[in-house]
Image (cartoon, coloured by chain):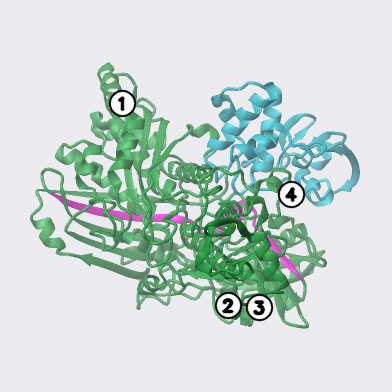
Chain colours: A green, B cyan
Amino acid sequence: MATAEKYVGGGVPRKEDPKLLTGQGTFLEGLTLPGMLHAALVRSPHGSARINSVDVSAAAAAEGVVAAYSGADLADEWAAGLPMAWPVTDDIRIPDHWPVAQDVARYVGDAVAVVVATSRNAALDAAELVEVEYEVLEAVVDVEAALADDAPRVHESFDDNKSYTWALTNGDVDAAFAKADVVVSERYTQPRLIPNAMEPRAVVAQSVPSTGDFTVWSTTQIPHVAKVLFALTLGIPEGQIRVIAPSDVGGGFGSKLNVYAEEALCIALARRLGKPVKWVAGRSEGYLATIHGRDQVQKIEIAATSDGDILGYRVNIAAAMGAYLQLVAPGVPLLGAFLYCGCYGGEAYHFECTGVFTNTTPTDAYRGAGRPEATYAIERAIDALAREVGVDAAEIRRRNFLPAGDMVQSPGGLAFDSADYEPALDRALELLDYDGFRSDQAERREGGGGKQIGVGFSSYVEICGLAPSQVLASLKYAAGGWDAATVRMLPTGKAEVVTGSSPHGQGHVTSWSQIAADALGIPYEDVTVLHGDTHVAPHGMNTYGSRSLAVAGVAVHNACDRVVDKARGLAAHLLEVAPEDLEYEAGTFSVKGVPDRTKSMPELAFAAWTAHSLPEDSEPGLEASCVYDPPNFTFPFGTHVAVVEVDTETGAVDLVRYIAVDDCGPVINPVIVDGQVHGGVAQGIAAALYEEATYAEDGTLETSSMVNYLVPSAAEFPSFETDRTVTPSTSNPMGVKGIGEAGTIGSAPAVINAIVDALSHLGVTDVPMPASPERVWRAIQAAQGGEA
Amino acid sequence: MKRISMTVNGVRHEADVEPRTLLVHFIREQLELTGTNVGCDTSSCGACTILMNGQSVKSCTVLAVQADGADVATVEGLASNGDWHPVQKAFHENHGLQCGFCTPGMMMAAVGYLDENPAPTEDEVRLALEGNLCRCTGYHNIVKAVLAAADDMGS
């Protein structure tokens, strides 16, 4: 298909912006329905406690209160517990997970009762009146402590706190290690992170008692997936549930990729009370009740020759699941399981991961999900190898890069498309002026002052496009990897794109409009994109894992191709020529050799709608759908570079420069892509320097609000320097790969490697995340043999 | 209940409020101006930033009764006669927003700051916005937008 790329590749300003800039956004907290009630939850203040009794009578009698229920009161609402869709092994232990706990509360924040009232304030006030008698049990919050033989058990029905162990071996790992000149053994911790989408979660459920129909508005990334799972959890026929993710959802980063207790609960309450029920999370409540990310302990060993050529990898991970298994939590480490060898070669690879229950808020996919953890481990460890064998940090990466090519076999077991890792490293070094930097660094060191500089690299490859359904099946993922689009020309010559993706900041309305406008040859302004409402867009697998463009966007592209194919038949019929005698360009069919005999897409749209004269066997209308299931994942890559200045007296780290060279294939909208990189990089830097959710031994979340969980502000960042190499994926016809998570995946190890580099002359080899001034200072003291 | 009056986006309102009502809740629920968002419960995020008597304030840290008699401006009043404020234009042109949830507060903070300092440096903008959190943009394009708006307003 010949298309003039008028919009694709250009930084078209976003269609999403005008209402967001003028206060006309449709965030869910603003939705009010007639007769709407408000729910407030009572949550356990204990890490682990038996619920001996719940007395809701005082709350039920309070002003404005319509109903108050304990977990036991609601037990008959559930056809099944809250869903978990990724049972990674046959023998995985899956605990019951009820929206409101019935016998034992297993983390601080586990719901134990709910109050429904005519206003949110009345519900919150009355929730204080619910009396719960707890028998406090011993809690365990640390992932390694939970694996000890005598650890308190999170679930008494299981013999220990292991949920599963999943392993992968490629090649002869023992042989690779036996012949190695050098083995580096590293241990890293991945702090627990709180995703902090700026819009707190909210849900509104409405029932129509006479028909049994439900409409559920939710701040979700996954309206279509949620619809299926609401049906199963609540025992409602799927066809009677409509799920709407509002056209404006305020960020997600994985935290809205779930089926939450409050969603199921509002549906159940709407069913029971026959009125709409709304719940809006307070930020601090969300810290307890919305999934956390990371929280892993990683052990990685690399076997190499004395030249630093890598022979093999051995990786062992303990991953906190929290108190229950949320939607895809067990699979999160598996998304990194193939990537602990990064973009490097080797003969053999072993990965093993144990999912562990702790008395904490459940974890699940947070931006990057498994891949930032893997990238952190290998990118830190390869620096350790560089130090061990005395090779420069950039050089050791270059030496070990997989060869350029397509479907290049990685020791982790996957074949990477579009591999070409050196140009991104070269470009990053050029932007940095690497030689100039090293000479500045040497000067500083010679000067011996208290402000030392360092550079850190991170050359990552990641997996996007969650993706081929058959491969997901082999990993026991209980959903498909496809996505859907319908493209229809309207009689007035405009186009409607219906997408299965569910954007919440990514700008799909803009990018899908660019794709469709070019393919259909109509103005960008004439394309409308519909999403997020299961009655409008009936099919979708939704937005997570940087999959939207590489799956749903390709579905839009393919559906446009099919519309153009159908239009070609109609144009040929109307122009009385054979279809192959037509040329198509920029929305116009013309007869070869007779360029003034033409039919434009708007003309054809109208002709298809009136249906006055159609080709034989052709139906009225100009519309086509595509359900796209890619043949493979996509594998974006890049090199990120951080430059830091470290105050050796105080341990304070100043991030001076940040350079990101990414390869996500051809770019639809460079401005949006840069924005995704900026935001992703900021979240990775935040993990490296500031953010960490911590628990007291009794299960109290110490970082319980935005006051003591350090979400960084503009003042903590420099401007970012971004550039790209473009190596198209061979897995899809657009060559696109995905960019939503790359920044987060690449950035944290670059920052920590830079800090270690700045202090390497002092003997520092490790600083744990987040690298607070105190931790940096202690690392310096320890390396110098002082107090640490 | 206490009777208060205030001017919001040039329109005078009188209402009875519970003394515990936060200004942001008054604006959102009683005046039904839902452009101002609530992103936290600790006055940390700045999503609810508005202008009160020309100064940017987090409207979750002000009681509605404290704003009795005040002149309040919210995001809904930023454009005049359909023409966007230079800050709105600059956010659009520089991709200064993604999900858009922090945007109303971020823009109001920027408008308040540019009134105090019409020609700021990048570092000054970064410091000035430290009370407003964004999780999508990494602030890069927000800072760029505020600098562009300053240029536009100064020219």
**Is residue A703 shown left or right of residue A157?**
right
Sequence-wise first label, 3 or 4? 4
Write down the region rendered in magenta.
Answer: A276-304
Residue A640: % across, % down = 36, 40
Q: What is the CA distance from the residue labelled 4 to the residue labelled 2? A: 34 Å
Sequence-wise first label, 4 or 2? 4
Residue A76: % across, % down = 63, 82
Amino acid at pointer 1: Phe
Q: Dot 1 surroundings within 10 Å: few (below 14), some, or many (20 or more)?
A: some
Sequence-wise first label, 4 or 1? 4
- Residue wearing tag 2: A233
Same chain shared by disc 2 and disc 3: yes
Q: Residue at x 66, y 69 (%)?
A: A536
* Vertical comparison of B17 with A587: above or below: above
- Residue wearing tag 3: A73
- Residue wearing tag 1: A437
Q: What is the CA distance from the residue labelled 4 to the residue labelled 1? A: 48 Å
Q: Dot 4 surroundings within 10 Å: few (below 14), some, or many (20 or more)?
A: some
Amino acid at pointer 3: Asp
Residue B48: % across, % down = 70, 42
Secondary element at image label 1? helix
Secondary element at image label 4? loop
Disc 1, disc 2: CB below 8 Å? no
Residue A563: % across, % down = 57, 66
**Is residue A235 shown left or right of residue B13?**
left
Dot 3: chain letter: A
Amino acid at pointer 2: Thr
Disc 2, disc 3: CB below 8 Å? no
Q: What is the CA distance from the residue labelled 2 to the residue labelled 3? A: 17 Å
A298 drawn magenta: yes
Residue A773 visible somewhere in the drawing = yes
Q: What is the CA distance from the residue labelled 3 to the residue labelled 4? A: 40 Å
